[in-house]
Amino acid sequence: MPDPRGLRGRRYLLSALVAAAAASVLAGARSLSAITEWIADAPAWACLALGFPVDPLTGAVSVPHPHTLRRLLVQLDGDALDQVIGAFLTARAAPAPAGLRAVAVDGKVLRGSRTATTPAVTLLAAMDHTGTVLAQRQVAGKSNEIPAFAPLLDTIDLTSTVITADALHTQHAHGTYLQACGAHYIAVVKANHPGVFDRVRHLPWQDIGLDHYERTRAHHRQEIRRLKTAAFAHIDYPDAQQALQVVRWRRDFSTGKLTIERVYLITSLPPGAA
């Protein structure tokens, strides 16, 4: 006869605790104290839905002590948990439209994670353009986001995807990696890659026709975005086929200030597909 307090029972309780912690975060909890308070105050029907066991004598739902939850969360493998949650969300996401799927890679510092003895925690995440986080990975404390790029995307099917990221990830190794995975990229080029930046910046953009124009007005400002593309077969970057120039005009109505920003990019997408 199986022991409800044995290995299977403990795994069942652990899964219920993790589900409860995730539910509390979705409900707005932003700290361990808030998570434990949410679970302690949760109605019985919610605890039953999350999988907490019922006391056979009293019929009451057994909710673990807050210290039990704290010990569990401290011992969890964060990367493994992120991978499971990402796979869960991906499986339940709405079907992607026909064509290429856009996935953005970006880093973020967790607010409130810095302590007197430890630096703030930085996470690198991959998100599709519907807002679903597909994968997330903690950046090593004494490193930066670059070494975490490939391990993060290894957990995602990159078939028919276009990866976007900031200029920090415009690395030859990243371009080669994405090419090997069958993915495309749109990479920002800045002065940290002086050779590529100079070649792209000095293309005859004034003679190239406009591909896209957009004017928006919101948040007390007006923005105009102009996009030009140029096929360019001699960029020193893996499989680069096009260069792009994006010009953003932004006027703040409250101050009257006008700012103009030019951004240069390269992509592995063929002409007509960017």
Image (tube, rainbow, N blue to C red):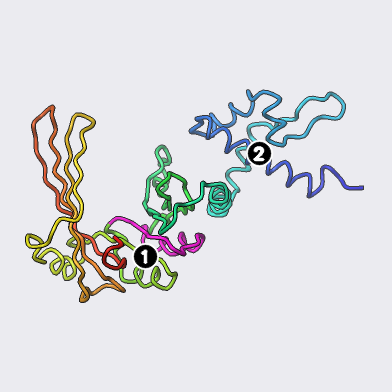
Q: Quadrant of residue 199?
A: bottom left
Residue at the image point whose x is 86% and y is 45% from the top: 3
Q: Is residue 72 left or right of residue 227?
A: right
Q: Which residue type carries mark 2?
A: Leu
**Residue 183 image point, x, y percent:** 41, 66
Q: Which residue type carries mark 1?
A: His
- The outermost residue toward the right is 1
For label 2, the SS is: helix
Q: Is residue 128 left or right of residue 35?
A: left
For label 1, the SS is: strand
Q: Quadrant of residue 240?
A: bottom left
Residue at the image point whose x is 68% and y is 43% from the top: 15
Task: Specify whether residue 165 is painted magenta.
Answer: yes
Q: Kindly identify which residue carries mark 1.
A: 184
> In the displayed structure, would residue 125 be above or below residue 17?
below
Q: Quadrant of residue 83?
A: bottom right
Q: What distance separates the C-alpha of mark 1 from that of mark 2?
A: 39 Å
**Residue 53 image point, x, y percent:** 77, 34
**Residue 34 image point, x, y percent:** 53, 29
Task: Give 260 or 116, whichever is nearer the viewer.
Answer: 260
Task: Give 162 or 36, whichever is nearer the viewer.
Answer: 162
Q: Which residues are magenta?
A: 144-166
> In the displayed structure, would residue 121 be above or below residue 198?
above
Task: Give 90 or 190, whichever is nearer the viewer.
Answer: 90
**Residue 245 image point, x, y percent:** 17, 58
Task: Specify whether residue 217 is painted magenta.
Answer: no
From the image, state whether disc 1 or disc 2 is nearer to you: 1
Q: Kindly identify which residue carries mark 2.
A: 17
- Image quarter where the C terminus lies is bottom left
